[in-house]
Amino acid sequence: MKMKRLHTGFGVIVSTRGFFNPELAHEGRVEILEKLKSMGYDTVCLDESDTRYGLVETMDDAGKCADLFKENADRIQGIIVCLPNFGDEVGVVSAIDKAGLNVPVLVQACDDEKDKMDIAGRRDAFCGKISVCSNLNQYGIKFTNTTFHTCAIDSDIFTEDIRDFAKVCRITAGLKGLRVAQMGTRPAAFQTVRYSEKLLQKMGIQVVPVDMSEIIFAAKRLEMTEEVAEAAARIKSYGRLEDSVEEEHIVKQAKLYVTVKNWMKENDCQTGTIQCWDSLQINYGCAACLTMSMLGEEGMPMACEADVTGAVTMYAMYLASGSPSGYLDWNNSFGEDRDMCIGIHCSNFPKSFISGPFEIGSLDILGNSLGKENCFGACKAVIAPGTMTYGKISTDEEKGKVKMYVGEGSFVEEEIDTPGGVAVCKVPGLQALMDHICSSGFEHHVAMNRGNSAKVLAEALGKYMGAEVYYHKGEEARK
């Protein structure tokens, strides 16, 4: 199923200073707006009829810019400041401060050219950027820097900076006001997944609880509607079904999927977690994994074992990459290779996260004690090779903070004979990472997502959301 598009729009401030050549700023304004449009981003910027060339220089300009941004606040997930010349630090910071949008800010300044250092061609943006950033710091406005202190608007490096910044903006916009479904309570034996709702609320994240009995009885009451029939048909084509799977198992799973999805929509929840064992198996007769996998594939990540902060992590990763997240246990060592380990869950991995053939059957371990007939819905596979980002958000009640670790590694192709959903992982500096996880009190669960998103997740959660972030940078952290 196609993932939904994640919208990102920018407020754009292009600034000039009176005794510098305004034509440079005018040209820069045209260039950056054309660039952002070509990259598919919506923009809000002063028109050339509003101020001289549509630039911000005076306090009057700053006021007009702030009003424009406030009027279009729903279109702006971040602000880009462009300095084609020195720029006006007071005008820039005043516009952002008066707009009061509380969104990420990216500051870019243009390169000077060695053969254009006369009065008409010299930019001095190298210096002006320092002044603008100083003012942003004085006002307590958090901002993101470009890779290079200055760069050309048409440079590849600035293109990558914009793309990364857009991800930061999507993460912060998506987490503010996020509603997380908690379906049921945690397993009694898993104190590791306890968390603080109040600390998440301070970050703008709301937990919406529902008793598992409500979900179970709603699924039981559901008739064989067209919606259920469509879900059953999708299950049959979603992966390869074990030979022992019967039609009643498929229909039961389809009813659970429809019930959970509709409850999420009705309660405006974007992600969630389920008490996936063992009440569901005993009182309804199927596993939750397949339902969670299918919802994750649609951009509605679902974490296991009522791990609410895990669901938040999965959703943050989805916002960063636009692709589904998986949820695993840091589970086994890999022989004596200290940079490799095995991640396992029953599993609820989304189809495109697996990225290869997989089997849908009954839970292997719980099926032995609860009955295979009550445990249909596990997605069994070895995750296909590729780069990945891993991480976990948690709450620290003693410090009164939300915390996170994040880093990057890879899924590798190795023969492994073990049941469930399996990921053979290579993580540079793994032993140092495990030491941090254990000494900092993180859970045994970990969210993973294909691609490289650690940098933007650390920037968004650490700088703009106020979390305490440990960014594990592989070889640098190796013991």
Image (cartoon, helix red, strand yellow):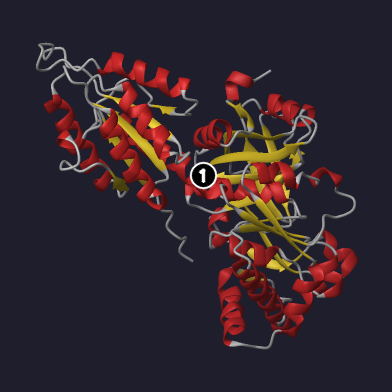
Nearer-the-camera pick, 283 or 151: 151
On screen, residue 249 versus residue 78, left or right, reads right
Task: Identify the image quadrant of residue 376.
Answer: bottom right
Q: Give the quadrant of the C terminus.
A: top right
Please tell me which residue is depicted at 32% across the width and 31% down the height of the picture: 81
- Residue behind mark 1: 171
- Mark 1: which amino acid? Ile
Q: Secondary structure beneath disc 1?
A: helix
Task: Identify the image quadrant of residue 366.
Answer: bottom right
| Position in image of residue 317 (x %, y %) | 55, 46
Q: Say whether residue 12 is visible.
A: no
| Position in image of residue 153 (x %, y %) | 24, 31
Task: Work out whether 316 lies above or below 248.
Answer: above
Nearer-the-camera pick, 200 or 409: 200
| Position in image of residue 288 (x %, y %) | 72, 66
Q: Say whether residue 11 is visible.
A: yes
